[in-house]
Amino acid sequence: MFVLEVEKVEVMDFLNISVAELPELLASGKAQLVDVRTDAEIVRGRIKGAISLPLHLLPLRLQDLDNGKITVFYCQMGGRSAQAAAFAAGQGLQGAANLQGGIMAWAQSGGEIVA
């Protein structure tokens, strides 16, 4: 008989933030906004006040983020930012969050996009 031992891996949860919730959260000063898109995507516009941190650099720069704030990650449509939030939460970042629908949902809701 073959027995396979599997190590239990704990999946860390992260928050999902809607575009309607984001302005108040940012105005409170209790959150930081992180754009995980590539530089080529960011030149087309970003959400005002966002920190640029491409997803592939997140493991190298996670410690640069303020662990005392909610960290809202966003990308184009929400997929990569969900990966970023899950990774950050798994690494112990408190208050990791994903902006649902990404910058596309933000723009569709009338949110400001800056150069």
Image: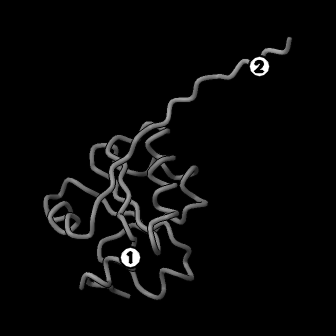
At a point 46% along the width and 88% down the height, the residue shown is 44
The kind of secondary structure element at disc 2 is loop
Label pair 2/1, CB-CB below 8 angstroms: no
**Would residue 39 be found to the left or right of residue 25 on screen?**
right
Residue 115 lies, with reference to residue 71, above or below; the image says below
How dense is the environment of label 2, judged by Cα within 10 Å: few (below 14), some, or many (20 and up)? few
Say which amino acid is labelled 2: Leu
- Judged from this view, the residue extending furthest toward the right is 1
Toward the viewer: 72 or 15?
Answer: 15
| Marked residue nearer the N-terminal end (2 or 1) | 2
Q: Where is residue 2 in the image (x, y as percent from the top left)?
A: 84, 15
Quarter of the view holding residue 29:
bottom left
The kind of secondary structure element at disc 1 is helix
Q: Position of residue 7 (x, y in %)?
A: 64, 22
For the N terminus, the image quarter is top right
**Would residue 9 be found to the left or right of residue 28 on screen?**
right
User: Which numbered disc covers residue 64?
Assistant: none
Kindly identify which residue carries mark 1.
103
